Amino acid sequence: MRGKFITVEGTEGVGKTTNIQFIQAWMEKNKLAFATTREPGGTPLAEQVRELLLAPREEKVCNTAELLLMFAARAQHLNQVIEPMLGEGAWVLCDRFTDATYAYQGAGRNMRDDLISELELLVQGSLRPDLTLILDIPVEIGLQRAGERSTPDRFELERVEFFERVRNRYLQIAADSPERCVIIDASQSIEGVQAQIEKALNKFLENA
Ligand code: Z5A
């Protein structure tokens, strides 16, 4: 049987990394074969593209180049990791996927949704996540959390308004796809956030 594809999304510092560890433990507890991966990245080539995308640089990266690099990394990741794992029956847990492109390149960079959906069709065909957990938090809190943790990458150097647009798009995606997306209130304590995640995962597993 084909595996399930679960993605975790949200704005900066929302706690994806922290909670992906919790989801891994939940999968082990439920004896599910799974692989954890991330975007951009997930293969040696795609990780190199990630480095290109995240490194702060003096040269302005044009929006089209950024969008194409995201989908180039995704094409490789799908071909080398995601599709084979799902085909073997493993669940795939992915830190960000195409919802991030609609949120960051679409809403953040003001790129047209129809261009993104054409690339989505080219690269993914009909593949979409089975479940997407959208961790939601006021932008200032997320940026504060992320800032305390590491030096900013090229995206984290953006203004607050950029991340407000990203956050609003994620909320819109959740409203448009309620059968796939669950919003998690990530402003709560780590225990509170993980209780919400566990509830969503248990419900998904019951129906899987
Ligand atoms: N990007 C894009 O533009 N288009 C695309 O299509 C894709 C990506 C796929 C890299 O993503 C960048 O790529 C991203 C969008 C762009 N922009 N940036 N930057 P990334 O996912 O690798 O990077 P990130 O969003 O910055 O994630 P992050 O910095 O790794 O943050 P996080 O994983 O969400 O947070 P965390 O490390 O788990 O937590 C941050 C801190 O908060 C840490 O100290 C925790 O201990 C703490 N924390 C976590 N939860 C809590 C709670 N509940 N209470 C208190 N403190 C907490």
Image: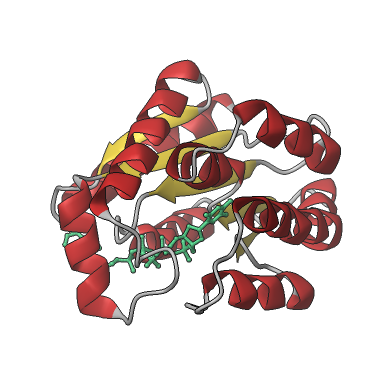
Residue at figure coordinates x 86%, y 56% from the top left: 79
Q: Is residue 51 left or right of residue 121?
A: left
Q: Position of residue 123 (x, y in %)?
A: 82, 43
Determine whether, in the image, residue 160 is placed left or right of residue 154: left
Residue 159, compared with residue 203, is above or below; it is below
Q: Toward the viewer: 146 or 154?
A: 154
- Viewer-proximal residue among 73 and 64: 64
Q: Measuring from the top left, give residue 71's x and y in whole percent.
A: 73, 52
Drawn side of residue 72 relative to residue 140, left or right: right
* Residue drawn where x is 67% and y is 36% of the image: 116
Total numbered circles: 0
Q: Is residue 44 left or right of residue 41?
A: right
Residue 75 found in image quarter? bottom right
Q: Quadrant of ligand 1?
A: bottom left
Q: Position of residue 179 (x, y in %)?
A: 51, 19
The percent coordinates of residue 1 (x first, y second) are 81, 38
Q: Relative to 26, say whether 202 is above or below.
A: above
Q: Quadrant of the C terminus?
A: top right
Query: In this figure, which colouring scheme has been used for the structure?
Result: secondary structure
Q: Confirm whether residue 199 shows in the render.
A: no
Residue 99, picture quadrant = top right
Residue at x-position 41% and y-position 32%? 169
